[in-house]
Image (tube, rainbow, N blue to C red):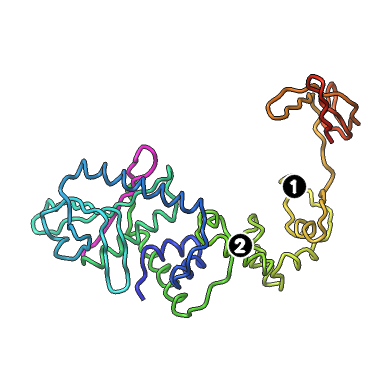
Amino acid sequence: MTITDQLFEAFLQCPTKCFLRAQGEPPTGNVYSDWVRGQSEAYRSAGVTRLLERLSAIGPPHGLLDPADAISANWQCAVEVLAQSQHLESHIHAVERIPSQVGRQFAQLVPIRFVRANKPNNVDKLMLAFDALALSEATGLQVAFGRIIHGDEHTSLRIKTGVLAGRVRKVIERIGKQLQTGQAPELALNRHCGECEFQARCRQKAIEIDDLSLFSGMKPEERERHRRKGIFTINQLSYTFRQRRQPRREEALGKPHYFALQALAIRENTVYVHGSPQLPDAETSVYLDIEGLSLLSTGSFDCVAGHGGVSLFLGRSTVRRDDSLYPVC
């Protein structure tokens, strides 16, 4: 099976997303995902225009780069390049051709990727390394480095793709094994879900099975630790909370977050306060503002804490504007 750049990027973001794309699953719709895709395409289009202003000679017009095009001396820059090999396929944003300064050596090919973010992440760097690997296999030439043009200032970042080649091959191998089995990977929600076109589908399934990944703050290692104990759902996790005295070392590090207590609160539909809350001891004034109108507060409060003002209060009050009274609970 041919592994494309879209499948490779999807696997880096989420194995489930890669599997669904490979199976041709229709997206469930995500407005934010569509907006991010549109912004990325607009940035890439603007970046290509800026690049062509500097490198005027255009490369292969058909977009498919082969070994004959790689050694040709008739072009400096190619955009929207399709690099194909026996099992890899990548749509490269742009390829710059640097002529060799020594004898009969071949020219250097430099893949270029446009990234809208001001700081490229690991996914962006691995995507560039995938482009370089596909370009190398398609042309038979060694691709030593590539460039990421990113951010508002269109900053150019030089990446040694050879260093990342080993990691890219391992990911390609994992993708191949996943697609050969034909079985969907274990569902796990992550931070990328907000930008994914399958967000609604995966979240609905996670709710149906009460999956632990619904707790966005729980790390994969912690989820795996619970699963080794036979705890697979939030409801099961809720029965594991036991209130214990907090060690002094943990007190120095701050209040930890107990997912078991959070699960218990969800199961019993109850708000729990862990430990003794410390009320602030500072002068605080009360100011009520409704729909942008400054209002005068009247009534009595049961003051819980505070000196010279009210920092926390319980009770009922009314706010007055002109002759109208608005009850506030």
Q: Find the residue positioned furthest to the front.
A: 323
Q: Find the residue positioned furthest to the top.
A: 322
Image quadrant occupied by the N terminus: bottom left
Give the residue displayed 33% in from the left and 52% down from the top. 113
* Magenta region: 141-156
Give the residue displayed 42% in from the left and 74% down from the top. 176
Give the residue displayed 62% in from the left and 67% down from the top. 205
Residue type indicated by callout 1: Lys
Q: Are marks 2 and 1 in contact (CB under 8 Å)?
A: no
Q: Find the residue positioned furthest to the left.
A: 103
Residue on which the image places disc 2: 203
Residue on which the image places disc 1: 255
How many numbered markers are drawn? 2
In this rendering, position of residue 191 left or right of residue 308: left
Residue 111 falls in image quadrant: bottom left
Q: Secondary structure at mark 1?
A: loop
The answer to whether residue 235 is magenta is no
In this rendering, position of residue 55 left or right of residue 184: left
Mark 1, other Cα within 10 Å: few <14 / some 14–19 / many ≥20 = few
In this rendering, position of residue 257 left or right of residue 127: right
Q: Mark 2 vs mark 1: which is more N-terminal? A: 2
Residue type indicated by callout 2: Arg
